[in-house]
Amino acid sequence: MIYKNYPMVSRVVFGRGSFNQLDEILSPKRKGRNAPFIFYVDDVFKGNHWLTSRITLSYKDKIIYVPTKEEPKTSQIDQLVEDIILEYSELPSGIIGIGGGIVMDIAKAVSLMLTNKGNSKDYQGWDLIKQPAIYHVGVPTISGTGAEVSRTTILTGPERKLGINSDYTPFDQVILDPELTKDVPKDQWFYTGMDCFVHCIESLNGTYLNAFSESYGEKAYELCKKIFLEDSLSKEEAQDKLMMASWHGGMSIAYSQVGVAHALSYGLGYLLGIKHGVGNCIVFDHLEDYYPEGVAQFKKMKAKHNIELPQGICADLEDYQFDTMIDVALSLEPLWENALGKNWKTIATREKLLSLYKKM
Ligand code: NAD
Ligand code: ZN
């Protein structure tokens, strides 16, 4: 048995208002006046003085606002990297992602592709990255994905939706300021928060489970139940705790895997562009055969917060489209093996997946 030797985020600051310290965290990392800091910021914050006034631009630093209607594509990453290379004479001092999973993944991917030659699609997979990334910083503004702590950046390429998983992917620095999440719309709060809940359920019920994953998964699960099923927390406490649940949920899957919901949700994402959070919810709602207790709790949470999930999204699909989704889902072998064990192929048949997709 060879045990994986994983890297982790090397520095983290936590606290309401900790985003004020961005400047003093970055300045020692500046490599010179021709090596800028590039800030990718979710375009929902364009014109938001409360947030953007705390980003100080010096020399050639730049803020790039990123639309987040669609999840990141490999072609988009390649373009962003090319833009930087054409515009500056030196590599940046750092790449900072301020936003949800989309913007954090963009920051991670750009920082990797600035030092690794070629196209980002060629690095989708496990441990294909050879060179360390540019210094990169993650600042989540919505909680749940665990992207702030993970060793992957999930991209949609021409052939697949798959992460760049590598030892160089995790952030060098994360700023956890729960106050930044205060204006997240309710539905989105639920969808992204449920990503964390689903990470816990898939990790805790997986065959890859071990004490490392379990300890983080149990903590995140307990926090999710408090946040989404009880009324005991103030708004601020709930924001603080969801940020930590996301972190722990991410840590839990670091040393295990996700499962059925993520596999099927990747299929929806690839074919229909359904986003990760809502996609997981749409899928998870139908997974009572695999995760009976988790799905029962999920349904309670959904009812408590009056969430209406999109229905009938697969109603008008053709056979070949179902086939594409099934191919994408079944290609994620580690997820199925974690969920169902070594003999997963006898349980997760194409017919079974088809019947599940047809319910959505
Ligand atoms: P997101 O980045 O898609 O953002 C969702 C929406 O919330 C956007 O419209 C955004 O503008 C808005 N938003 C974010 N912060 C806000 C704020 N403070 N106030 C108001 N609106 C705000 O959402 P997400 O669920 O965090 O991320 C999903 C993405 O993360 C997907 O691309 C998925 O593939 C990726 N992901 C990555 C990992 C990883 O480990 N790298 C894990 C899970 C998911
Ligand atoms: Zn997820």
Image (spheres, grey):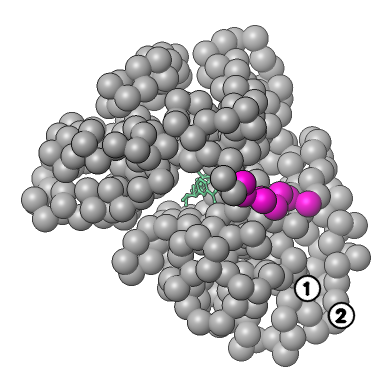
Furthest-left residue in this view = 319
The crowding category of the residue bearing disc 2, from other C-alpha atoms within 10 Å (few below 14, some 14 to 19, many at least 20), is few
State which quadrant residue 182 falls in.
Answer: top right
Residue at left 61%, top 69%?
Answer: 112
State which quadrant residue 343 falls in.
Answer: top left
Which quadrant would the N terminus be assigned to in this image? top right
x and y percent of residue 25 in the render? Answer: 86, 56
Q: Is residue 169 visible?
A: yes
Task: Name the residue tied to disc 2.
Answer: 32
Q: Does 51 appear above or below 96?
A: above
Amino acid at dot 1: Ser
Residue at left 81%, top 36%?
Answer: 15
Boundaries of the magenta span: 3-10
Q: Secondary structure at mark 2?
A: loop
The crowding category of the residue bearing disc 1, from other C-alpha atoms within 10 Å (few below 14, some 14 to 19, many at least 20), is many
x and y percent of residue 200 in the render? Answer: 52, 29
State which quadrant residue 169 falls in.
Answer: bottom right
Q: Does 131 appear above or below 295?
A: below
Question: Would you say 122 lies left or right of 360 here?
Answer: right
Question: Looking at the image, is mark 2 or mark 1 earlier in the sequence?
Answer: 2
Residue at left 59%, top 60%?
Answer: 166
Amino acid at dot 2: Gly
Residue 196 belongs to magenta span: no
Q: Name the chief secondary structure element in magenta.
A: loop
Is 126 or 12 nearer to us in this picture? 126
Q: Are marks 2 and 1 in contact (CB under 8 Å)?
A: yes
Q: Secondary structure at mark 1?
A: loop
Task: Name the residue tied to disc 1.
Answer: 93
Is 212 or 66 nearer to us in this picture? 212
Is 114 or 317 nearer to us in this picture? 114
Question: Would you say 103 lies left or right of 60 here?
Answer: left
